[in-house]
Image (cartoon, rainbow, N blue to C red):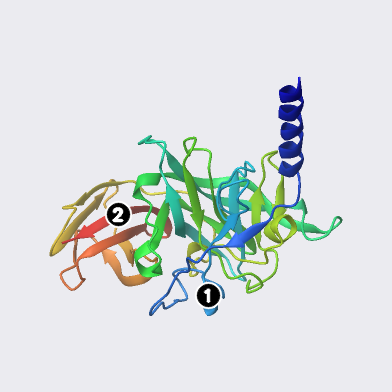
């Protein structure tokens, strides 16, 4: 009888704590950035790297991360961005601070999402309404095993490009969710140090009941996530049609890459590196690219036909 009573009491205590204010503590792990240059048409980093990147853990009773999944059952972590002119959002860079694939499941993954916004969610204060993430309009799932957690940004920038871009002229959000993550696995991203956010309450989480709230409201953390959108700021109107290339070869390549699409139209091509920075552009390409001036490494080649952006593919240069 006493054992039953004690077990029930322990269950009630734990249940009560699950609904209590989330708390955190800082880990000794912090990230570093060297020679990072933002260009007008590559990646929105905001004010992220003007401070010290950090990683915050949940309290020991509920293991996990404030900026990732945890025993509170958080479903997603998302960062809101603002643009003043129409731009094409082509992908996401996420700087992961920690992962653990203890499940051993090779199919365990992380979903990277692009969201539009709604205005019916709670921020700091009981009556504060903020523009929060809403519908997922682009998504791509990446295997957890491929995600790099280097503490140096240049080595740990995990880049994902959507099959087709989406266009915004005001606000949007990018983030990642845990719906493809196997039970027992953990993922978390770097954040700014508390109180160093570029603009207060642009970091959001989707909690276990699927509602949204800011990290400041839930955790008391005034931070930005290291989740960055890759954009093309030169877009002038909204395009919906995408091209479908037939061949990009050889890949890996050394000196030249041949490209052919179904309608044989000239191509406008952008090559970005694995941090999302624009390396070079090619206009009116009809057959092949000379790439022998580019250092060996992993790149992404973004292809446009006329004024219809639509296709991106990884390119390995040896």
Q: Position of residue 140 (x, y in %)?
A: 45, 45
* Front-lying residue, 88 or 215: 215
Residue 3's tag is none
- The residue identified by callout 1 is 52
Q: Residue furthest left?
A: 255
Instruction: Classify the position of the N terminus by image quarter.
Output: top right
Q: Is residue 229 above or below residue 69?
A: below
Question: Disc 1 versus disc 2: distance between alpha carbons?
Answer: 31 Å
Q: Position of residue 257 (x, y in %)?
A: 18, 59
Q: Position of residue 142 (x, y in %)?
A: 40, 45
The residue drawn where x is 77% and y is 40% is 16
Task: Find out whether the residues at labels 1 and 2 contact each other: C-beta distance under 8 Å.
Answer: no
Report whether 117 appears left or right of 69. right
Give the SS element for disc 2. Answer: strand
Report whether 308 appears left or right of 265. right
* Front-lying residue, 102 or 35: 102
Q: Is residue 240 above or below residue 5?
A: below
The residue drawn where x is 51% and y is 54% is 188
Q: Residue furthest front?
A: 2
- The residue identified by callout 2 is 314
The residue drawn where x is 60% and y is 65% is 224
Residue 93 visible: no
Q: Is residue 183 above or below residue 238?
A: above
């Amino acid at each position: 009888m006493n054992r039953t009573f004690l077990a029930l009491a322990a269950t009630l205590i734990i249940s009560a704590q699950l609904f209590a204010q989330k708390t955190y503590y800082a880990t000794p792990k912090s990230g570093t950035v060297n020679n990072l240059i933002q260009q007008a048409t590559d990646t929105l980093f905001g004010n992220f790297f003007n401070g010290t990147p950090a990683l915050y853990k949940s309290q020991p009773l509920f293991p996990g991360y404030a900026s990732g999944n945890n025993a509170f059952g958080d479903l997603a972590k998302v960062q809101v961005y603002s643009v003043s002119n129409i731009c094409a959002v082509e992908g996401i860079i996420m700087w992961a601070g920690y992962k653990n694939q203890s499940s051993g499941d090779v199919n365990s993954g992380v979903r990277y999402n692009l969201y539009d916004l709604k205005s019916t969610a709670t921020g700091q204060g009981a009556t504060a309404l903020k523009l929060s993430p809403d519908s997922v309009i682009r998504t791509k799932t990446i295997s957890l095993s491929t995600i790099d957690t280097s503490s140096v940004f240049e080595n740990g920038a995990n880049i994902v490009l959507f099959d087709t871009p989406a266009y915004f002229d005001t606000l949007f959000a990018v983030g990642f969710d845990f719906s493809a993550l196997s039970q027992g696995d953990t993922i978390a991203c770097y954040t700014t140090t508390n109180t160093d956010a570029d603009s207060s309450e642009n970091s959001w989480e989707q909690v276990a009941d699927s509602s949204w709230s800011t990290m400041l409201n839930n955790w008391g953390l005034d931070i930005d996530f290291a989740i960055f959108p890759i954009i093309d700021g030169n877009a002038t109107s909204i395009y919906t049609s995408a091209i479908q290339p037939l061949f990009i070869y050889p890949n890996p390549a050394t000196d030249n890459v041949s490209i052919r699409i179904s309608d044989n139209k000239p191509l406008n091509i952008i090559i970005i590196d694995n941090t999302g920075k624009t390396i070079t552009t090619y206009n009116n390409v009809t057959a092949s690219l000379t790439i022998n001036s580019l250092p060996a490494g992993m790149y992404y080649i973004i292809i446009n036909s006329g004024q219809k952006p639509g296709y991106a593919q990884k390119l390995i240069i040896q």
